[in-house]
Amino acid sequence: MPTPSVIGCNIGQKSHQSTGKRPSYKTLLQSRTTEINLCGRKSRHNSFFLFTESRDCMGNFAVEVRRVALQLMGAILEGLGLGKDYEHDKFEEGLQLLSVNRYPKESEGDSTIGLAAHSDYGFLTILLASSQGLEVVDRNSDSWKVVPQLPHALHVHVGDPMEVLSNGKIKTVVHRAVLNPKEARVSIASIHGFALDEKVSSAKELVNEQNPEKYNESSFSDFLDHLTSNMDKKPRNFLESLRK
Ligand SMILES: O=C(O)CCC(=O)C(=O)O
Ligand SMILES: [Fe+2]
């Protein structure tokens, strides 16, 4: 069983803008996260971690959700005609990020946006949320659609590297979180990608004369660099920056 590499809190851009400095995202990622070894031999955590009391539970969740992600990934790769074991080792040895988000209850006069529109840098995101609040862009009508909160259900969506690997056949899901008017909300986004410096490129099996390669290759590390280099400006969409 692969070991999830990082558990941490939301690494969205907004929370770090107030410092006025441009921190290295890799530093932030390391300093604000809790690394655990799920075999129980090593654990490192700091006070920023919300779930210190529940780390066994979070550890088990991380392992199980990773198993689901790898199975789903196999099915998607099969659906793309690449075979379920395509780039097997890179997925198995890839990283998993658990991003824990806590949103206050919506209060009158406040913005209703909890997390601004974005797409994730992971092949798959599996989201567990305590109540409704996720919205996704419906590409057909170009409008926001509320994702209904189903009891005991996980929400799964694909991210930028999936669009790149599939050479545009599968589209990244643009999403955001809105505040819930009834209660504070907690969500845990489990994001699955290749290792930090492993490049993702379009599968050559999906590139031909009719479908030339649409994106430049990139790694999770490149994505983090892109975020930090855009902190003072309106960020340019990372996927757009990869378009050939
Ligand atoms: O809280 C949510 O519904 C969405 C969280 C999310 O998009 C993220 O953590 O990347
Ligand atoms: Fe997200």
Image (spheres, rainbow, N blue to C red):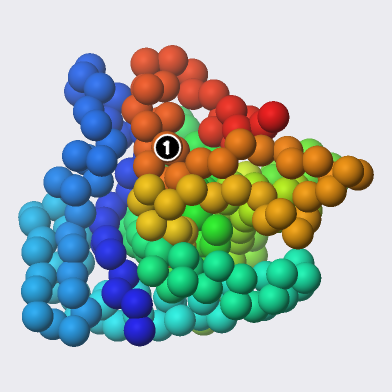
Left or right: 65 in relation to 1: right
Residue at 22 percent across and 28 percent down: it is: 23
Residue 109: image quadrant is top left
Residue 16: image quadrant is top left
Residue 146 location (% of width, % of height):
66, 54
Residue 53 location (% of width, % of height):
13, 73
Residue at 73 percent across and 38 percent down: it is: 214
Left or right: 192 in relation to 163: left
Residue 191 shows in the view: no
- Residue 28 to residue 163: above or below: above
Residue 184: image quadrant is bottom left
Q: Nearer the viewer, residue 57 or 172?
A: 172
- Residue 75 to residue 191: above or below: below
Say what secondary structure mark 1 lies in.
helix
Left or right: 180 in relation to 188: right
Q: Which residue is mark 1?
A: 222
Left or right: 172 in relation to 130: right
- Residue 35 to residue 92: above or below: above
User: Which amino acid lies under the numbered mark 1 shown in the image of this protein?
Assistant: Asp
Residue at 20 percent across and 54 percent down: it is: 33
Residue at 25 percent across and 22 percent down: it is: 22
